[in-house]
Image: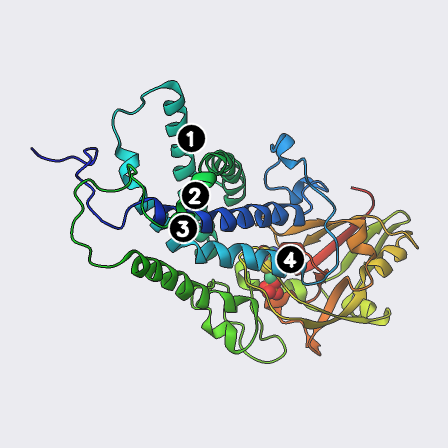
Amino acid sequence: MRRSPSSPGFWRSPLRGPWLTSVLGVVLLGGITVLFVTGLVSYAAYNPGLSPVNDKTPDKGILGFYLFSWPTDPPWLYRLTQGVHVTLGITLIPVLLAKLWSVIPKLFALPPARSLAHALERISLLLLVGGALFEFVTGILNVQLDYVFPGSFYPLHFYGAWVFFAAFVAHAVLKTPKALRNLRHLKEEKDDLVSPRPAEPTVSRRGALWFVGGGSLLLFATTAGQGFDGFPRRTALLAPHGGGDPGSGPNGFQINKTAAYAGIDEAQTSGDAWRLVVVGRTGTVRLSRADLLQLPLHSSALPIACVEGWSTSDQWWRGVRLRDLAALVGHEGDPPDVFVESLQRRGAFRRAALRANQVADPRSLLALYVNGEELSPDHGYPARIIVPAAPGVLNTKWVARLTFGDL
Ligand SMILES: Nc1nc2c(c(=O)[nH]1)N[C@H]1C(S)=C(S)[C@@H](COP(=O)(O)O)O[C@H]1N2
Ligand SMILES: [Mo]
């Protein structure tokens, strides 16, 4: 008789069994919970409740119940949460694949459903497996490529996360007690994962775990460096590299979108052409770069931390405090929110809104210099926003207009 994937004898690896599945399951229980929480945190960090321009999933409804005003302290907050999100996600790929491999016979088991409860369980498993693959694939594509999925990454990854996590919670509630029992009695119980006619082993269960763990370690070692400067960054072989060559010198740190990519040319940013327009309670003020340099300049040491997981260590920025610019247009003492627009014509990140607490922070600058030198065109010359703890996307480059007032 030809065996099909749904017959018990088809899957013959002697490695399959409750122990291996349980070990991998417990690792994923912790890991995926951290991924979910840091993912929600990342969404909150965009301050989507503040303005539609910050919100990539405007139809979220009650799924935004938890949103809060993103703080400015500690200044490395987003560097940490998003670095963990992306690095952990990449590190868990081998564990996820091994877990799916370990339960693959169940995917093919017949009959499809023995009872209503069994049918519901299998549907939840489809959501679980489909959701896991979808979240990992969209996440990796967003980090690695300039995104190729149909539809915007943000809503797909956001709604996918909720579907996946709901199935994940149901699965964890049902299976964790059994997994922990399996791990305590190291002897394999009779279980439908155990092949009825196992093939000769070619590797021990522990060997298989080492193989998976080694794969994870390799991915970790070639990713984690993207959150640091110098030598560690060069070890980050899997970090995104599409952003343009940062070169060396004071402006030699990672670039996301280059000036050329954003369609910014010198004719728009040169001394005569560029003016910063500041709008507020008392009207509109136009400032050249020379005018800005006449205002009190301040320094702050702050990183850039991108949603893609990479970040720089602190750069030394120098420029005008956002709250001083607010004061110029009638908002002394208690600065409001600000809407920031750049010279860029197209692209999702050409404008952003910042909340009052971000404007009020004395470290928040309209930066004119970085590391003692003028900003390079790729880092946002003539002026860019830099705000402590904010995700990179709120640090708008090539700023042209600031509108202060409650949004
Ligand atoms: N005008 C404009 N500003 C922008 C962007 C952009 O595409 N356009 N990208 C943002 C993103 S996503 C990041 S991570 C930071 C990166 O800053 P850097 O290129 O100076 O490192 O710039 C932000 N500012
Ligand atoms: Mo970014």
Q: Residue sitting at 26 percent across and 38 percent down?
A: 105
Q: Secondary structure at mark 2?
A: helix
- Circle 2 crowding by C-alpha within 10 Å: few under 14, some 14–19, many from 20: few
Q: Nearer the viewer, residue 313 or 6?
A: 6
> Which amino acid type is shown beneath numbered disc 3?
Val
Q: Secondary structure at mark 4?
A: helix
Instruction: Answer with mark 3 or mark 1, whichever residue precedes in sequence.
Output: 3
* Horizontal relation, residue 390 to residue 162: left or right: right
Quarter holding the C terminus is: top right
Q: 314 above or below 386?
A: below
Instruction: Answer with mark 1 or mark 2, whichever residue precedes in sequence.
Output: 1
- Which residue has dot 3 on it? 23
* Horizontal relation, residue 267 to residue 199: left or right: right
Q: Which is more foreground, mark 2 or mark 3?
A: 2
- Which residue has dot 1 on it? 124
Q: Can residue 264 be seen at all in this image of the molecule?
A: no
The percent coordinates of residue 146 (x first, y second) are 46, 54
Coloured how? rainbow
Q: Residue sitting at 67 percent across and 59 percent down?
A: 77
Q: Which mark is residue 78?
A: 4
Q: How many marks?
A: 4
Instruction: Answer with mark 4 or mark 2, whichever residue precedes in sequence.
Output: 4
The percent coordinates of residue 171 (x first, y second) are 46, 36
Is there a contact, CB below 8 Å, between mark 1 and mark 2?
no
Image quadrant assignment for residue 368: bottom right
> Which amino acid type is shown beneath numbered disc 4?
Tyr
Instruction: Answer with mark 2 or mark 3, whichever residue precedes in sequence.
Output: 3
Q: CA distance from mark 3 to mark 1?
A: 21 Å
Q: Secondary structure at mark 1?
A: helix
- Which residue has dot 2 on it? 181
